Image: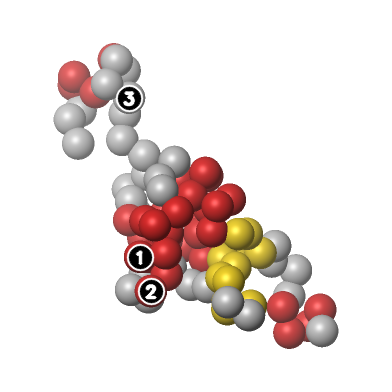
Amino acid sequence: MAEILGSDPLMTVAEVAEAMRVSKMTVYRLVHAGEMGSVRVGRSYRIPESALERYIASTNPQGLPAAPGDKDAATNPS
């Protein structure tokens, strides 16, 4: 069974929502739209940690923007 799931930890929708600081409904929308990979377990969804990382990387391929108070933000606007 471990070979099927691999060693990638599965996260609940609530855990993903907390990590992304969005609502659970936002996570459900991403899952249903196919933008974030998931596994259906009964009536609930589990999101592999790697799927969350891929989603974040795909939405921001350049890396995180500078914070508003950062010195480099004024000289290098995104």
Compared to 70, does 15 lie above or below? below
Instruction: Say whether disc 2 or disc 3 marks the residue closer to the N-terminus.
Output: 2
Residue type marked 2: His
How many marks overall?
3
Residue hosting label 3:
67
Position of residue 6 measured from the top left corner of the image (x, y, whole percent): 73, 75
State if disc 2 and disc 1 touch (CB < 8 Å).
yes
Give the foreground label among 3 and 1: 1
> Residue 32 bears which disc, if any?
2
Q: How far apart, in angstroms, are the residues tagged by discs 2 and 3?
A: 31 Å
Quarter occupied by the N terminus: bottom right
User: What residue do we see at 75% from left, 68% from top?
Assistant: 7
User: What residue do we see at 60% from left, 59% from top?
Assistant: 12
- Which of the 4 image quarters holds residue 40? bottom right
Q: How far apart, in angstroms, are the residues tagged by discs 1 and 2?
A: 5 Å
User: What residue do we see at 55% from left, 52% from top?
Assistant: 14
Residue 31 visible in this rendered orientation of the protein: yes
Position of residue 34 measured from the top left corner of the image (x, y, whole percent): 37, 75
Q: Residue furthest front?
A: 43
Position of residue 63 measured from the top left corner of the image (x, y, whole percent): 37, 44
Q: Is residue 41 left or right of residue 64?
A: right
- Which of the 4 image quarters holds residue 57? bottom left
Of 78 and 1, nearer the camera is 1
Residue hosting label 1:
29
Q: How far apart, in angstroms, are the residues tagged by discs 3 and 1?
A: 28 Å
Q: Secondary structure at mark 1?
A: helix
Instruction: Say whether disc 3 or disc 1 marks the residue closer to the N-terminus.
Output: 1
Compared to 24, does 37 lie above or below? below
Of 5 and 77, nearer the camera is 5
Residue 72 visible in this rendered orientation of the protein: no
